[in-house]
């Protein structure tokens, strides 16, 4: 009899336990759960890093007195003068004082020493166009704090990144922080396709652009990367492709089909190809974290730089400071390409869209020193570039966002 009662007692205790567990589970997954942004939730997300609990693209720009992360007068070792708006004489700098606060995500303040320690013995690679180069320069400045760093080694030769005879510059750069053995590199590949000189003799020399093959550099050095950040976008127009004498190829032969002759389709096809290739490689490189950065928005008004469009707003957050909707990325090409793969999306399009005041447009072009006494100085007075960003600036945020996700 007592046995029966204790059986019933045990039964109700376990029922209560089951109900309690159910309640906790429901609480944790509930949309309205106040714990979602608390440390409890962060612990949960650490256990399931692949679950999409946190969307870094959602959030708001907030004023931060600790910004910028380095001075635009410094970092001369890596920062292109053209992008250093402090040096280029831009008059207003309120755009430097903001950071992105993602909603419900754990994003610690950037600390370069913590970052380098975390990246001990690791290599971070950027492959992409000039916006990728901006992100690379930004990360070099963030990691060095903008300080002169004679100890940082130029290791470009290890990756074949040396200036070819007659070339204006090498195809990329690689630097190593010796204290933590951290390497940060950039390779210029504007289209993320493999470029191979064609054997035609008539000038202009044509280059085969293999849309279904990633750049040789990426294939050759992938095994050495721990973090890879890809981007492309602004070179996918007829002017750039014809100007570079690129000839599209697929399956080793010149593209004939009408479908790929539409440049938007060619871009879409290439992004999907490179993602598919990389996704198939990742199981062989378990330590590699791969990101595809979405397109960086332009803010030319009334056309583009050819038609004199400009972006002369100087007031931060005139377009609003917050992204609240959950509709997914503006860059549907990258979003659909990485969907269901091991690559992560680095979705910076919407948050950068809000920052039309942070482009290098409005900087004054300083007259270059004439090479010869006889040549006249013919400098344009004001830069009209609503594509590239001032540094320090918006690309620093792109870096903080991927660092928070590695
Ligand atoms: C630096 O890191 C690489 C791996 O990324 C490792 O092979 C190498 O031994 C390290 N060098 C030193 C001096 O720690
Ligand atoms: C970095 O590499 C060196 C040399 O291979 C090794 O002694 C050290 O333990 C490594 N450190 C980390 C954090 O991987
Ligand atoms: C171009 O010519 C070189 C030898 O001159 C040859 O090795 C290469 O395969 C040729 N490339 C193509 C695409 O025909
Ligand atoms: C390339 O080859 C694949 C497989 O043989 C084929 O399905 C595809 O249509 C080809 N693409 C082009 C553009 O020729
Ligand atoms: C900004 O550019 C527009 C033309 O796009 C021009 O009408 C306006 O006067 C400019 N504003 C300033 C403050 O320069
Ligand atoms: C991702 O793929 C899944 C399954 O194929 C599909 O249901 C979903 O709509 C896709 N999401 C996006 C954003 O493309
Ligand atoms: C430089 O300017 C002077 C006068 O403005 C003109 O006579 C001369 O032809 C110019 N020289 C060049 C190289 O453009």
Image (cartoon, helix red, strand yellow):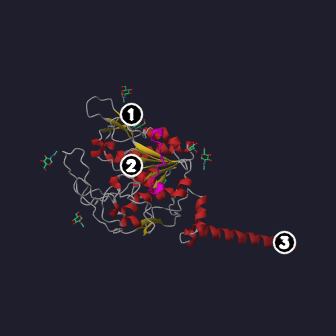
Mark 1 secondary-structure assignment: loop
Q: Position of residue 300 (x, y in %)?
A: 28, 58
Viewer can see residue 406:
no
Magenta-drawn segment: 142-158
Whether the residue under disc 1 has CB within 8 Å of ligand 3: no
Membership of 146 in magenta stretch: yes
**Picture layout, residue 110 above or below residue 276:** below
Q: Quick one: 284 or 157, which is closer to the camera? A: 157
Choose between 161 and 397: the one closer to the eye: 161
Q: Earlier in the sequence, mark 3 or mark 2?
A: 3
Write down the quadrant of residue 359 in the picture. Answer: bottom left
Residue drawn at (19%, 45%), measured in percent from left and top?
375
Tell me which residue sits at (41%, 38%) in the image. 162
Q: Mark 3 — residue?
A: 4
* Front tag of 1 and 2: 2
Q: CA distance from mark 1 to mark 2?
A: 22 Å
Looking at this view, is 22 or 287 the one in front? 287
How many numbered discs? 3
Residue located beneath label 2 in the image: 232
Q: Name the spot of residue 323 as percent of width and height, x first.
A: 42, 66
Check disc 2 and report its element: helix, strand or loop: loop
x, y percent for residue 166: 32, 36
Whole-number angstrom distance, CA of label 3 to CA of label 2:
71 Å
Q: Is residue 89 visible?
A: yes
Give the labeled residue for mark 1: 252
Which is nearer the N-term, disc 1 or disc 2?
2
Q: Are marks 3 and 2 in contact (CB under 8 Å)?
A: no
């Amino acid at each position: 009899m007592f046995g029966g009662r204790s059986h019933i007692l045990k039964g109700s205790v376990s029922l209560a336990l089951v109900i309690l567990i159910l309640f906790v589970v429901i609480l944790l997954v509930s949309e309205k759960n106040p714990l979602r942004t608390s440390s409890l939730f962060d612990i949960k997300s650490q256990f399931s890093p692949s679950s999409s609990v946190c969307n870094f693209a959602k959030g708001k720009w907030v004023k931060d007195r600790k910004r910028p992360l380095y001075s635009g007068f410094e970092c001369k070792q890596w920062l292109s003068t053209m992008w250093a708006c402090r040096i280029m004489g831009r008059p207003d700098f309120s755009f430097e004082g903001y950071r992105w606060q993602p909603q419900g995500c754990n994003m610690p303040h950037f600390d370069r020493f913590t970052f380098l320690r975390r990246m001990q013995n690791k290599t971070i690679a950027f492959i992409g166009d000039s916006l990728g180069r901006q992100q690379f320069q930004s990360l070099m400045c963030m990691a060095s704090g903008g300080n002169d760093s004679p100890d940082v080694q130029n290791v470009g030769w290890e990756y074949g990144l040396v200036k070819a005879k007659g070339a204006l510059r090498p195809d990329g750069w690689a630097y190593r922080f010796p204290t933590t053995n951290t390497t940060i590199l950039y390779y210029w590949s504007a289209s993320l396709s493999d470029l191979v000189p064609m054997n035609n003799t008539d000038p202009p020399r044509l280059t085969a652009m293999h849309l279904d093959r990633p750049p040789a550099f990426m294939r050759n050095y992938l095994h050495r990367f721990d973090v890879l950040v890809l981007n492309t976008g602004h070179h996918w127009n007829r002017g750039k492709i014809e100007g570079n004498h690129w000839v599209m190829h697929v399956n080793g032969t010149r593209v004939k089909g009408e479908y790929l002759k539409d440049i938007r389709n060619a871009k879409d096809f290439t992004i999907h190809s490179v993602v598919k290739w990389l996704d198939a490689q990742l199981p062989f490189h378990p330590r590699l974290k791969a990101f595809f950065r979405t397109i960086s928005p332009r803010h030319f008004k009334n056309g583009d730089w050819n038609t004199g469009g400009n972006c002369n707003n100087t007031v931060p957050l005139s377009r609003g400071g917050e992204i609240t909707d959950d509709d997914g990325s503006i860059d549907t090409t990258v979003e659909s390409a990485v969907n269901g793969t091991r690559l992560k999306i680095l979705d910076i399009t919407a948050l950068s869209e809000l920052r039309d005041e942070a482009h290098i447009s409005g900087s004054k072009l300083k007259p270059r020193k004439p090479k010869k006494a006889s040549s006249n100085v013919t400098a344009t007075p004001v830069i009209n570039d609503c594509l590239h960003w001032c540094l320090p600036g918006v690309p620093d945020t792109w870096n903080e966002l991927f660092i928070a996700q590695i």
